[in-house]
Image (cartoon, helix red, strand yellow):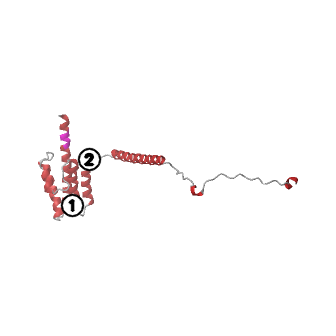
Amino acid sequence: MFFAQLQVPPRQLPDLPQGPALERARGPIEIPPYEPWQIGLMIGLAALALGLLIYCIVFIIRGRRARTPQLSASTTALAELQAAAELTTIDDERFAVLSSLALRRYFEVGKHIPSLGRTTFEFLHALDADPQLNSDARASLSEFLEHCDQVKFARASLSTDARNALTESAIQLVHELERHNAATSAEATTT
């Protein structure tokens, strides 16, 4: 208790140094979560990953296409002719359109003779310079296309026998042209 009664003269504390004025005070400095070079690096890596993904997808799709066997033009034409005969038993015009289109595609794809988008006259005229067609094949093709044109444009009707005869003549024409191609290929390999 004695010490509590002692009177100690109050000491003067020294004056504080001049501190910052409020006019010069700044708020907290914002530090971005990422530096600009880090953002650029992330964008570059994302673009690289996206490009690699697209490349892989294209590579897989091309690989699948390469594994898919391509049918020959004659096989495709024969299948189309059979389908036209089987699926259009009551629609003569559709039969004529599909059958003539099957033969025209055969010549376009298999023989590289422009036929699609041409009239029958223009198509037959383009065949005049082609050595692959003999006169019998040319006559058979001309007769087939004329019958199809009569059905398509003159609204002629076909009996079941006429329809079968047209389909058979087109199939025979494709087989004859394929035999001619095989013979020509055999001659070319022996010489």
Mark with earlier residue (2, 1):
2
Give the Cα distance between marks 2 and 1. 29 Å
Q: Nearer the viewer, residue 156 or 126?
A: 126
Q: Nearer the viewer, residue 157 or 94?
A: 94
Three-letter code, disc 1: Thr
Residue 15 in percent (x, y) is at: 69, 53
Residue 57 in percent (x, y) is at: 39, 48
Near mark 2 (Cα within 10 A), the count class, few <14, some 14-19 or many ≥20, is few
Instruction: Specify start and end residues of the magenta stretch as a single range.
Output: 181-185
Q: Nearer the viewer, residue 68 or 8?
A: 8
Q: Residue at x 15, y 62 (%)?
A: 150
Residue placed farthest to the right in the image? 2
* Residue where numbered disc 1 is placed: 160
Depth-wise, is mark 2 or mark 1 nearer the camera? 2
From the image, give the main secondary structure of the stretch colored magenta.
Answer: helix
* Residue where numbered disc 2 is placed: 72
Which element type, helix, strand or loop, lies under badge 1?
helix
Q: Are marks 2 and 1 in contact (CB under 8 Å)?
A: no
Q: Nearer the viewer, residue 40 or 57?
A: 40
Three-letter code, disc 2: Ser
Residue placed farthest to the bottom in the image? 155
Q: Residue at x 21, y 61 (%)?
A: 160
139 left or right of 26 in image: left
Residue 47 in percent (x, y) is at: 42, 48
Which element type, helix, strand or loop, lies under badge 2?
loop
Q: Residue at x 33, y 44 (%)?
A: 66
Residue placed farthest to the top in the image? 191
Instruction: Reply yes or no: does residue 125 show up in magenta.
Output: no
Near mark 1 (Cα within 10 A), the count class, few <14, some 14-19 or many ≥20, is few
